[in-house]
Image: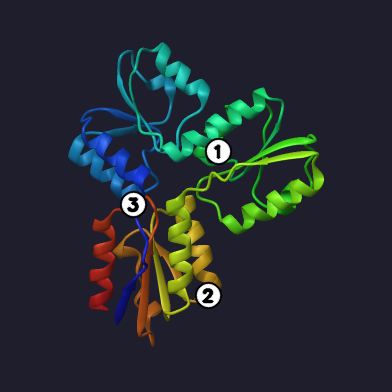
Amino acid sequence: MEIKLAKKYGFCFGVKRAIKLAEKSPGAITFGPLIHNAREIKRLEEGFGVFVENETTNVKENQSVIIRTHGITKQDLEILKNKNAKITDATCPFVIKPQQIAENMSKEGYSIVIFGDITHPEIKGVMSYAHDPIVVGSLEELQNKKFGKKVALISQTTKQTKKFLEIANYLMQQCYETRVFNTICNATFDNQEAVKELSQEVDIMIVVGGKTSSNTKQLLSIAQMYCQSSYLVEDEMDLELSWFEGKKLCGITAGASTPDWIVKKVQDKIREI
């Protein structure tokens, strides 16, 4: 079995930064999972005593708290500050950008349209900075929404550029004024382009990453467009022998929250197959 890695894959700048901050803060808690990768979260718990806390009510006075890469709501941040928490902000700078845009454009009277998953922590955080935002996962969803004549469009950092542009084009035709802010992360775009290219060359495509990770699911979706035998695994234990029957060339990519050590274990397992 020949293996070929995508030209771009794995940890992005924001995740690398967050991991380093967590490793320098032993005994701290992270408010929400630091990143969307259960295996890496477990490594931080076992190796550095950095545990996840999901409720502000459980945060103690003066406790050391790391804010996750996806950010948190404006309201939760105020609660932590009122508890005098020792805050280490690991929010990815690419996530802070749409938060700031949502807040500023709301103050200027624009309707805020967010292309993203309303249940995702990144979007919950961005929504908290906007006045009555509209969140849509597709152009079809937007067509059923009412919005003002002045609209500001932003995106979840891990979404596909093509779909974002479809929404932007629609708004420009419907609104008196449309401000479009491309808040899709460069690393996300590069990883998506790389998987698009590789999945057209291989017999089987393995996407390595957390099953709750938005950017990982986007990579799988793109891979499946070009390679029918495309699968998502969290680690080497998820691989199934039957997937590789009759296959000669295996492509591998990984989500932005997937560390190299997991990718290597997947590679080694496939070599054994």
Q: Secondary structure at mark 1?
A: helix
Residue position for label 3: 11
Q: Is residue 67 above or below residue 241?
A: above
In front: label 3 or label 1 = 3
User: Nearer the N terminus, badge 2 or badge 1?
Assistant: 1
- Looking at the picture, which amino acid does disc 3 mark? Phe
Crowding around mark 2 (Cα neighbors within 10 Å: few <14, some 14 to 19, many 20+) is: some
Are the residues tagged 3 and 2 within 8 Å (C-beta)? Answer: no
Q: Residue at x 63, y 56 (%)?
A: 163
Residue in front for this viewpoint, 30 or 240: 30
Asked where in the image residue 77 lies, by quadrant, the reply is top left
Q: Between residues 240 and 196, which one lies in front from this camera angle?
A: 196
* Residue denoted by label 2: 226
Q: Which mark is residue 82?
A: none
**Dot 3 or dot 2, earlier in sequence:** 3
Name the kind of residue labelled 1 in the image: Ile
Q: Quadrant of residue 56?
A: top left
The disc labelled 2 sits on which kind of residue?
A: Tyr
Give left or right: position of 128 versus 206.
right
- Location of the N terminus by quadrant is bottom left
Instruction: Give the side of residue 148 with respect to residue 163, left or right.
Output: right
Disc 3, SS: loop
Q: Quadrant of residue 236?
A: bottom left
Please state which of residues 184 and 146 is positioned toward the viewer in this rendering. Answer: 184
Mark 2–mark 1 Cα distance, whole angstroms, equals: 29 Å
State which tag comes first along the sequence, 3 or 1: 3
**Residue position marked by numbered label 1 in the rendering:** 123
Where residue 205 sits: x, y (%)? Answer: 42, 72
> Residue drawn at (28%, 41%), measured in percent from left and top?
19
Total numbered labels: 3
Calculate the distance from the C-alpha at mark 3 to the C-alpha at mark 1.
21 Å
Eyeballing the image, is 175 above or below 110?
below
